[in-house]
């Protein structure tokens, strides 16, 4: 076979949709924008019924509408994951949407609230630990009846981590602790629910992915806590430029990333899709780094 026709075959194989997740019901938290929104779209293209869970109701509804208008199947269930009763609502709504089944949970919702250790408040600490560790635990616990089943259908839980969790990051003690925590939780799910029920659980750890979390702080994005506290998101431009290996007025070179560039949210989502797909059917309990090679 010529190289050209082999490339054609591969391209055809990669064409959407190919039904990798046909009829599977997936809860994706934090899916109103950024990586989660791309995961929802990628999963829907593969035939999944996706549940858009996000505190930003307007954006959650817009993503669900976009998916439904393009032939996919999505349900927006907006709410704040820091509110326990919303977690109950979310799992119930997902099970109803799935006619009694939930196959996939992507614990993706999150944000950063940075400070050096000696200036980190209890509130900063508790909020980030709650959102990145307690919430994935509570969703998984609430969804246990839909995962501890023997119906011969695949079940997958993917927890989203970060290079900060795997390697630490100055200024992110809370986030690093939380993102390290989910790796242990993931492995525990794999060991508890793998043997009898075939549930796969994996962690996907991102490096620098282009979303509002890594955009210029000056752009003004913010997360709003239940008590109204506003947490500014993004990275100050000067700090980002220094890390990217150049001055603010020069093109960045990203010397710490072997691929020499940040990843897109779409690329991040494709990695999550790969892990959730049957192509990874014998992979469980792992932490997969999606970093362009950073930290090798
Ligand atoms: N962007 C990166 O470089 C990067 C790197 C490593 C890890 N991550 C992780 O990837 C995940 C997605 O981040 P992103 O970059 O796409 O960010 P994003 O801000 O674009 O999207 C995160 C989504 O989570 C939602 N969310 C936040 N708090 C919530 C709450 N209490 N209840 C419900 N929804 C809530 C937000 O509204 C937002 O829509 C996060 O867990 C983040 O920590 C991102």
Image (cartoon, rainbow, N blue to C red):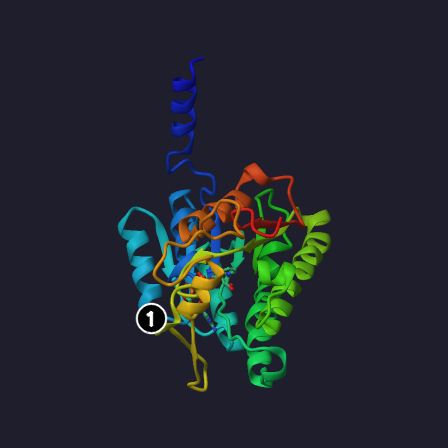
Residue drawn at x 57%, y 45% as measured from the top left: 154
Camera-side residue of 238 and 1: 238
Q: Residues within 10 Å of mark 1 (few under 14, many from 20)?
A: some
Q: Is residue 80 above or below residue 242?
A: below
On the image, the x and y values in percent for residue 227 come to 45, 87
Residue drawn at x 44%, y 66% as measured from the top left: 213
Q: Is residue 146 above or below residue 281?
A: below
Q: Is residue 198 visible to the viewer in this orientation of the structure?
A: yes
On the image, the x and y values in percent for residue 212 come to 39, 65
On the image, the x and y values in percent for residue 73 come to 36, 51
- The count of marks equals 1
Seen as rendered, the residue at the extreme top is 1
Q: Does the numbered disc 1 mark a residue whose Cβ is under 8 Å from ligand 1?
A: no
Camera-side residue of 294 and 146: 294
On the image, the x and y values in percent for residue 6 come to 43, 20
Location of the N terminus (image quadrant) = top left
Q: Is residue 30 visible to the viewer in this orientation of the structure?
A: no
Secondary element type, mark 1 = helix
Camera-side residue of 218 and 201: 218
Q: Which residue is mark 1?
A: 219
Camera-side residue of 17 and 147: 17
Residue 74 placement: quadrant: bottom left
Residue 18 placement: quadrant: top left
Residue drawn at x 41%, y 47% as measured from the top left: 42
């Amino acid at each position: 076979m010529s190289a050209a026709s082999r490339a054609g075959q591969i391209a055809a194989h990669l064409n959407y949709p190919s039904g990798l997740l046909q009829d599977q019901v997936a809860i994706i938290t934090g899916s109103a924008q950024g990586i989660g929104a791309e995961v929802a779209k990628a999963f829907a293209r593969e035939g999944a019924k996706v549940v858009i869970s996000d505190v930003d109701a307007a954006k959650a509804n817009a993503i669900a509408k976009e998916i439904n208008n393009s032939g996919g199947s999505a349900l927006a269930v907006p709410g704040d994951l820091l509110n326990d009763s919303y977690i109950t609502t979310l799992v119930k709504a997902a099970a109803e949407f799935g006619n009694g089944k939930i196959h996939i949970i992507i614990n993706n919702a999150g944000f950063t609230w940075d400070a050096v250790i000696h200036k980190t408040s209890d509130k900063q600490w508790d909020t980030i630990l709650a959102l990145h560790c307690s919430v994935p635990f509570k969703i998984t616990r609430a969804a246990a009846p839909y995962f501890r089943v023997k119906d011969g259908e695949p079940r997958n839980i993917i927890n989203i981590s970060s290079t900060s969790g795997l390697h630490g990051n100055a200024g992110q003690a809370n986030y690093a602790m939380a993102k390290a925590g989910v790796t242990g939780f993931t492995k525990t799910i794999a060991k508890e629910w793998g043997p009898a029920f075939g549930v796969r659980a994996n962690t996907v750890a991102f490096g620098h992915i282009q979303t509002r979390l890594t955009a210029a702080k000056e752009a003004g994005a913010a997360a709003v806590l239940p008590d109204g506290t506003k947490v500014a998101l993004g990275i100050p431009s000067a700090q980002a430029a220094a890390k990217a290996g150049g001055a603010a007025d020069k093109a960045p070179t990203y010397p710490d990333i072997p691929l020499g560039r940040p990843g897109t949210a779409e690329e991040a989502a494709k990695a999550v899709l790969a892990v959730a797909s049957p192509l990874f059917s014998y992979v469980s309990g792992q932490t997969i780094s999606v970093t362009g090679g950073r930290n090798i």
